[in-house]
Amino acid sequence: MQSLTQEIQSFSRTRLRKQFTRVTSLSGRRIIETWKGSTITVVDDPAPPEKTLGYVPDTSWDLQVGVVKPDLLLGSQDAAHDFGTLKKHKVSHILNVAFGVENVFPDLFIYKTVSILDHPDADLLLHIQDCCDFIQQARSEKGVVLVHCNAGVSRAPSVVIGYLMSCDSRSFDDALSLVKSARLASSPNPGFLDQLRGYKTPTVNGSKR
């Protein structure tokens, strides 16, 4: 029988099993997010609806847009795919932080895609600065930016919280409260919340950005 030390020394990454998450968006689209180590792939779920057990997907569109600031909005992929909603809110820039969600109006809006996996172990903070830079650019250009993921529940709210902490000098609690007030469905996964609680915002010349 091997000791724990021997088992650790003989461990190989090739023995890791692929992990996957099956995602059903509010618009009814089903995708599978698969990762092994740092490699992530996204494909459409081939399983027919009748074989999907445990719940009945809500196929109604979620067009509710949370107004965090007049020029900073938060929502789901449904809002990002509905031209009427985008026009109503005078959106000019769209930050897509989902996996497997296309940018459907590339000729009409300025897009940036920063694919983030909605998993507690995913490194959210690795992407915060890139997202903040895009949001800052949009606001400096007097534009209105919509931040969205798949359902507008975890990833997009987390990014907006990080932005408010980094660029608006807000505390974690204040930023979380503002985001939840703007969009009631906001509920970052526990791993993202832990990362944001410990987030040390960048400083410039000894002061916060």
Image (cartoon, rainbow, N blue to C red):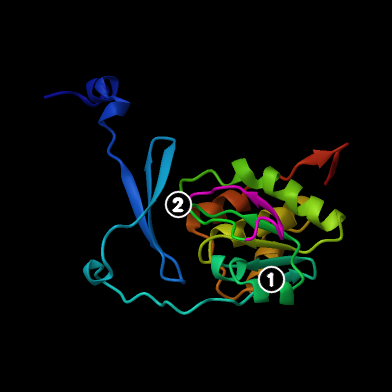
Question: In this figure, which residue is indicated by the disc labeled 2?
Answer: 119
Q: Judge the density around disc 1: few (<14), some (14-19), many (≥20) Cα neighbours within 10 Å.
A: many
Query: Alpha-carbon neighbours of circle 2 within 10 Å: few (<14), some, or many (≥20)?
Result: some
User: Does the magenta portion include 18?
Assistant: no
Element type at mark 2: loop
Q: Amino acid at mark 2?
A: His
Q: Nearer the viewer, mark 1 or mark 2?
A: 1
**Residue 139 visible in the displayed image:** yes
Name the kind of residue labelled 1 in the image: Leu
* In the depicted structure, whether residue 137 falls above or below residue 179: above
Q: Is residue 29 above or below residue 6?
A: below
Depth check, front residue: 198 or 55: 55
Do residues under tags 1 and 2 come within 8 Å of each other at their CB atoms?
Answer: no
In the depicted view, which residue is nearer to us: 104 or 5?
A: 104
Q: Position of residue 152 (x, y in %)?
A: 56, 66
Relative to 89, 185 lies left or right = left
Tag on residue 171?
A: none
Q: CA distance from mark 1 to mark 2?
A: 28 Å
**In the rendered image, which quarter contains the N terminus?**
top left
- The percent coordinates of residue 189 (x first, y second) are 49, 59
Residue drawn at x 39%, y 35% as measured from the top left? 37
Tell how many labels: 2
Report whether 191 appears left or right of 79.
left
Percent coordinates x, y for residue 45 in the rendering: 33, 57
Residue extent of the magenta highlight: 105-118
Taking the image as drawn, is residue 152 in sight? no
Q: Main secondary structure of the magenta part?
A: loop
- Residue at the left extreme of this rendering: 1
Can you identify the residue that label 1 sits on? 86
Query: Picture coordinates of residue 138 (x, y %)?
Result: 79, 55
Q: Earlier in the sequence, mark 1 or mark 2?
A: 1
- The residue at 44%/35% (across/down) is 38
